């Protein structure tokens, strides 16, 4: 299926005209795929970089067509990060990552997360406990997610503090927005399984997910966009629970700042709205919504236990209380996809979160 994956990548850029050396290398990769030869992860990354460049070129064309003239890039928007909005409100909706304007989960939800985290242990390929098994964590999402995950994997590969039984897998893919991956039959899910196979693990060994999603070219109101994304994430969690029988935890993050956007792909306030979609999603599980139940003792378990991953949004150059900002150079040419610097910034935020959150540290960090 890796071959299928790269064949799809190749098809996506078939109409592109690329400079000589890049065109030649990509043509060689496609020829090897046609001969049913294996390709390396570096070659896969290269092929995906071509797709990403094409997407950015498309966005640049939209820029040239006048979008940015009507919506000039903004150093800040005046919007307040959810982590600092607290009990304050935006369009009538309370801030904070969790109910009550709080940035920490309610005690009962946290205790449940801690119990579940304590049960995460290496599993063999059939999903049975084994000291020689693996704990698999994978990312699920769109182009930004795969770009950021690849930078995260490079950090992880050099980090000696991580659990040696841990396998981290990038299962995100370009153009796979929330509205698409709600479909459990989408080819994307076959490619997820192949990514796991390439990493030497099975769906039965996946116990943790990092989910980061959005939708492209939104035209709804702020609340309509957020509510739609929220419900799509419910369906995505159902897919994950069905496809990964031992899935226990999903950490959910929303997008980075969209005020530099040069196209209508996902500008403000929609990038900001994604935070409310995640907040409401988690609040519904805390409130006991049956569709998000994770506890078999309370009925059918249709979702994993969910909580915030790192909250990535900051108001452009206006620093958050923790110092986080999003500079123009943190975004690529289209102002929406992260640059290499932006990818590394997200990767560091994710690494810091997983090393220190009480529900991730027990299985993510090497025991001493």
Image (spheres, helix red, strand yellow):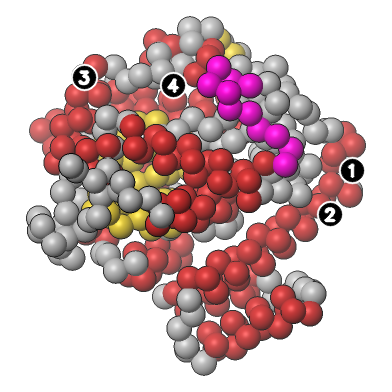
Q: Secondary structure at mark 1?
A: loop
Q: Earlier in the sequence, mark 1 or mark 3?
A: 1
Residue 321 among magenta residues: yes
- The reply, left or right, for residue 344 in relation to residue 138 is right
Q: Which residues are magenta?
A: 319-329
Q: Quadrant of the N terminus?
A: bottom left
Q: Quadrant of residue 222?
A: top right
- Residue 345, position as x, y percentages in the image: 56, 41
In the drawing, what numbered circle is on residue 108? 3
Q: Are marks 4 and 1 in contact (CB under 8 Å)?
A: no
Residue at (76, 49) in percent of width and height: 333
- Residue 188, position as x, y percentages in the image: 46, 62
Residue beneath disc 2: 61
**What secondary structure prevails in the magenta region?**
loop
Residue beneath disc 4: 97
Residue at (59, 14) in percent of width and height: 90
């Amino acid at each position: 299926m890796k071959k299928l994956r790269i064949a799809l990548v190749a098809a996506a850029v078939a109409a592109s005209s690329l400079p000589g050396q890049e065109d030649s290398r990509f043509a060689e990769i496609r020829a090897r795929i046609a001969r049913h030869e294996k390709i390396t992860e570096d070659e896969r990354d290269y092929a995906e970089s071509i797709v990403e460049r094409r997407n950015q070129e498309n966005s640049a064309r939209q820029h040239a067509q006048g979008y940015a003239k009507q919506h000039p890039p903004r150093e800040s928007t005046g919007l307040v990060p959810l982590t600092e909005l607290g009990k304050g409100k935006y369009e009538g909706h309370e801030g904070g990552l969790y109910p009550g304007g709080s940035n920490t989960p309610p005690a009962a939800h946290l205790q449940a997360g801690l119990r579940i985290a304590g049960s995460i242990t290496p599993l063999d390929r059939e999903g049975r406990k084994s000291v020689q098994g693996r704990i698999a964590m994978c990312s699920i999402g769109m182009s930004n997610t795969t770009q950021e995950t690849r930078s995260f994997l490079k950090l992880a590969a050099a980090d000696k503090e991580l659990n040696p039984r841990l396998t981290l897998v990038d299962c995100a893919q370009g153009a796979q927005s929330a509205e698409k991956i709600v479909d459990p039959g989408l080819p994307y899910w076959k490619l997820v399984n192949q990514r796991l196979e390439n990493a030497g693990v099975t769906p039965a060994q996946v116990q943790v997910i990092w989910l980061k999603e959005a939708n492209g070219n939104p035209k709804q109101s702020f609340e309509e966009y957020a509510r739609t994304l929220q419900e799509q994430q419910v369906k995505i969690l159902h897919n994950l629970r069905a496809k990964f029988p031992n899935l226990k935890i999903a950490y959910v993050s929303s997008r980075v700042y969209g005020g530099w956007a040069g196209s209508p792909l996902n500008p403000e306030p929609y990038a900001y709205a994604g935070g409310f979609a995640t907040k409401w999603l988690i609040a519904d599980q805390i409130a006991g919504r049956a569709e998000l139940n994770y506890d078999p003792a309370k009925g059918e378990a249709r979702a994993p236990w969910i909580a915030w991953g790192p909250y990535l949004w900051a108001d452009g150059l206006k620093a958050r209380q923790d110092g986080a900002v999003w500079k123009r150079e943190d975004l690529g040419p289209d102002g929406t996809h992260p640059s290499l610097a932006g990818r590394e910034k997200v990767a560091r935020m994710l690494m810091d979160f997983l090393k220190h959150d009480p529900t991730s540290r027990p299985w993510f960090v090497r025991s001493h």
